[in-house]
Image (tube, rainbow, N blue to C red):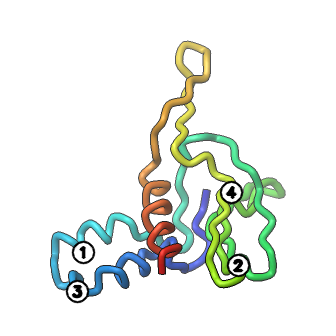
Amino acid sequence: MQIGVDHPIATAAAVEKAFADRLNNPAFMAQIARTKLATGTTFVSGFPDYMPITPGKSGTVIVRSVAADDIGGDPALVAGHVGRGRAILAGLNLGAKCVNVDGKYVTTEELAPEEESILVNGVFWLGQ
C-alpha cells in the first residue's frame, strides 16, 4: 500500500490540533511522530488483499495499492465530507494479519504500524 496525499489521516494534523496545548511536550511529540505518514510512504498491510474503493466527488484517496506495470494503483482508503459530517471508507483489511504457517494461511488480529497510524489519525479527523 502507498500513502498518496498529504491529509490529516496521514500527517497526524488532526491529533496535533486536538492536543495543541501539548505540542511543547517532547514525549507527546514523540508519540505523534510515530503516527505521521509521509506522501509516498509504502507499507505492507497485514492482509494481502483489499477492496478497491471508488471515490465520490468529495472523496480524497489517501491510500492506494502499490502499482506494478499496469496492475494495482487502486484506491484502498478514501476520506471525505458527506452532508455535514465526514466519512472514511477503507478497503484494507485493517487488523487482520495473514501468514502462511506450514502451508496453511492463518489469520490473526494484528495491525501493521502504518495501519495503526491510519486508525488513530482517522478517528481524530472524524471527530473534528
Between 51 and 71, the one lying in front of the other is 51
| Disc marking residue 65 | 4
Q: Earlier in the sequence, mark 2 or mark 3?
A: 3
Which numbered circle lies on residue 29? 1
**13 on left or right of 104:** left
The quarter of the picture where residue 17 lies is: bottom left
The residue tagged with tag 1: helix, strand or loop? Answer: helix
Q: Earlier in the sequence, mark 4 or mark 2?
A: 4
Q: Residue furthest toward the top?
A: 102
Rounded to the nearest angstrom, the CA distance separating label 2 from label 3 is 30 Å
Residue at (69, 59) in percent of width and height = 76
Q: Tag 4, which secondary structure? A: loop
What residue would you read off at disc 2? 82
Q: Mark 3 sits on what residue?
A: 21
Foreground: disc 1 or disc 4: 1
Mark 2 or mark 1: which comes first in sequence? 1
